[in-house]
Amino acid sequence: MRVFVTGASGLCGNALIPQLLAEGHTVIALARSDKSAEALRAKGVTEIARGATTDLDVLKQAASQSDAAIHLAFDHDLAFKEGGYVAACDQDRAAISAICDGLLLHSDGEHDTTIKTFVCASALLAGTGADETCGKIRNPQLPRYMSEELTHAYKAKGLRTIAV
């Protein structure tokens, strides 16, 4: 299986990439820098998509050449700046849309009828109770929940979606 991974050189990606490769998957890894690309190649990744999660055409193109995508990246540098969290969440949803739209296409631009998988690391759940059955807090100042909702909205368009 061809798997596109964002955040491939990050904390979760460093754990995931060797597992994917060991299982025989071909990994297309998003890399923002030469240093990250070199580190990924050293792990055995043979296909690098150069860009950031703001490079929506790069994301869509790489996803269109994949059977699945795992979105681990999030712009923490932006998120932890004064007033940056909402902007980072907006940026995350744009990336999710580009990746999912790409998965729905063949690499030749036609609609793909095979069922592909999108996994999104949505990171934080703000809830109103003690466990996962509680209601979510829908606060526009803490909009990370919207990434999870967007991920699951792509089920209706034909993707298998998972938010973790």
Image: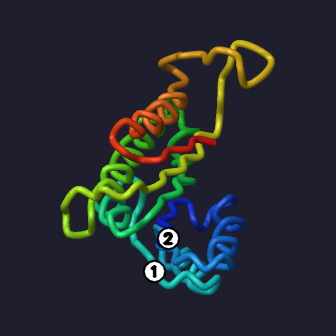
Query: Residue 29, percent across and down?
Result: 49, 70
Residue at the spot of label 2: 29
Choose top left, top right, bottom left or bottom right for residue 110: bottom left
The structure residue drawn at horizontal position 48% and vertical position 79%, both measured from the top left corner, is: 34
Query: What crowding class fits label 1: few (fewer than 14 Cα within 10 Å), some (14-19), or many (20 or more)?
Result: some
The structure residue drawn at horizontal position 36% and vertical position 67%, both measured from the top left corner, is: 62
Element type where label 1 sits in the image: strand
Indicate the quadrant containing the C terminus: top left, top right, bottom left or bottom right: top right
Taking the image as shown, residue 117 lies to the left or right of residue 163, namely left
Residue at the spot of label 1: 47
Query: Residue 103, percent across and down?
Result: 36, 57
Eyeballing the image, is 29 above or below 98? below
Taking the image as shown, residue 121 lies to the left or right of residue 111, namely right
Query: Residue 24, percent across and down?
Result: 61, 80
- The three-letter code of the residue at mark 1 reads Glu
Choose top left, top right, bottom left or bottom right for residue 136: top right
Which residue is at the front of the view, 58 or 163? 163
Eyeballing the image, is 51 above or below 121? below
Query: What crowding class fits label 2: few (fewer than 14 Cα within 10 Å), some (14-19), or many (20 or more)?
Result: many
Check whether the beta carbons of the residues at disc 2 and disc 1 lie within 8 A of each other: yes
